[in-house]
Amino acid sequence: MGRARNAVSALLDLAPPTARVLYEDGSESDVPAAAVAVNARFIVRGGDRIPLDGEVVDGAGAVDQAPITGESALVPKEPGEEVYAGTINGEGTLTVRATKAASDTVLAKIIRMVGDAHARRAPVEQWVAKFARIYTPIVMALAITIALVPPLLLGGAWDYWFYNALVLLVIACPCALVISTPVSIVAALTASARAGVLIKGGAYVEAPGRTTALAMDKTGTITMGEPEVAAVHPLVGVSARDLMALAASLEVRSSHPLARAILSRAKADGVSVSAAEDTRTVPGRGLEGRADGRAIWLGSDRFAEEKGFGNAIPADLRDQIGETGSTLVAVGDKAGVTGVLELRDRIRPDAKGIVARLHAQGVETIVMLTGDNERTARAVAAEVGIDEVRAELLPEDKVTAIEELVESHDMVAMIGDGVNDAPAMARAHYAIAMGAVGSDAAIETADIALMTDDIGKVPWLIGHSRRAMTIIHQNIGISLATKALFVGLTAFGMASMWGAIAADVGVSLLVVANAPRLLNGHRVEAGPSGGEPIGERMAKGALAHGH
């Protein structure tokens, strides 16, 4: 419940507390978001968070909807299109008509769903606690039987059988049984922390080893959450280097994610870049400027169409980029389109191998849940080997998808990194957060946090959970077998008090010695994405900060 409250607190910080309301007479004033009436108009400047759900009535721009929908690219917004509270306006100023009160926004629903999903989680009783309910009365009854039945019915000596009853109580005292689980859990938690996997309590050590279905977000989980230039398509006799130089010259002064991708590709290709002159942002469209005395531009295919060059982009190229779920960026001058850049969210280099390892470990169903468009999601899933795809989902849709998985699978895990993933993570049997890149809400909601953004640790986590449960079962088995042996000896009068004490203490020491073997298995296999072992210093630092 404490984690749920913390998650809600983090979510509340997403939406700004005030909105700049635009009145009929043209005046403006800052008003608490909760006091803004439905149909009131408010102003959202470039770079501001949007305070309420609404419909754009004036202006154009691109909005970062990742906090709510998880979409990896900025979404162009024009009059008539919907925006959500908690999302971030890019360039340009938007005038928005409020369509929902502050208490009814998508963000407000997420906050409620996180709390509801936590409340619906039934507490899991530990096996030892269940066993004790049966074990303790049976042992007490057996001790009384040994003390009374032989003297009363068989003429045995009272002192001899009373002594044997005491021996039974000593050997039956479940010291080793009781400590067998917690000492193993502590060792498992320590080993995982050394590997940079923070498990928030012993209740979540067992769950990964029983995973049968795994749902994961796309952006920031399977993909890097950063676009890259996947291909360069020069047209009309222009070389690829010239096309990259032209695009990069417009983007030199920009901090847009697509700009960073273009500049990174230009640098990797060794293209020298000089900044264009008189650059100007066209909200929701692209950029314009001048280079070597000629007018140049860069932007979406819609921008090319508005300039009258829509037909210059080959239809087969347009279809090819669309089928792979990539973003098309056209580059041109006043004469037409000089080329096209294909940008897409970069898939983690080891994602395909990780999915294959998860299947090999017995995870029957791996599902991608994403707010991105269907074509992009399916292209990524096909490349990685994911079983099912559910795209264009809002947070409540993700919760519904998780509930369906919970009904059909014994143990469902959800991996996510964003605020939009938090309700679904809370509804799963257990949740894993991408701790290095994840939002506070996702990390607080999760039961396990990966302190780097390496999903290669998920197969390791499943294996570690199974190793931990094997050692716990070994400890319980050793404890019960020793108890059963001495109970049998006691029943026939063949056990002594010193033997019972030695066996009880000996088994306790044995299970304590067995558990630390888990500490030797904390290393994570290195992979292309950098899944190298994390130092204990980092893990201790993370623990010290309350994760």
Image: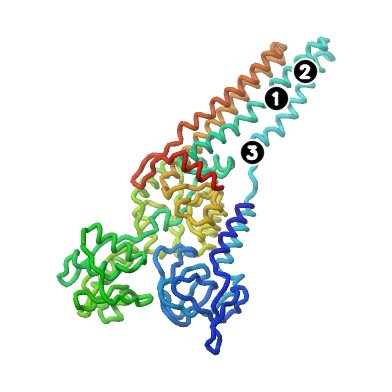
Residue at image mark 3 = 126
Depth check: give the residue in front, 506 or 277. 277
Q: Are marks 2 and 3 in contact (CB under 8 Å)?
A: no
**Residue at 22% across, 80% down:** 334
When the figure is inspected, residue 381 is found, relative to residue 356, above or below; the finding is below
Camera-side mark, 2 or 3: 3
Q: Seen in the image, is 32 located left or right of residue 63?
A: right
Type of amino acid at the residue the image marks with label 3: Gln
Label 3 to label 1: alpha-carbon separation: 19 Å
Q: CA distance from mark 1 to mark 2?
A: 16 Å
The front one of 183 and 485 is 183
Residue 5 in the figure: left or right of residue 460: right
Residue 123 sits above or below residue 396 on the image? above
| Residue found at x 56% / y 85% | 23
Specify few, some or many for label 2: CA neighbours under 10 Å numbering under 14, 14-19, or 20 or more.
many
Residue kind at label 1, given as amino acid type: Cys
Estimate the x, y position of residue 384 in percent, counting from the top left.
36, 52
Residue in the image at 48% along x and 37% along y? 464
Q: Secondary structure at mark 2?
A: helix
Q: Earlier in the sequence, mark 3 or mark 1?
A: 3
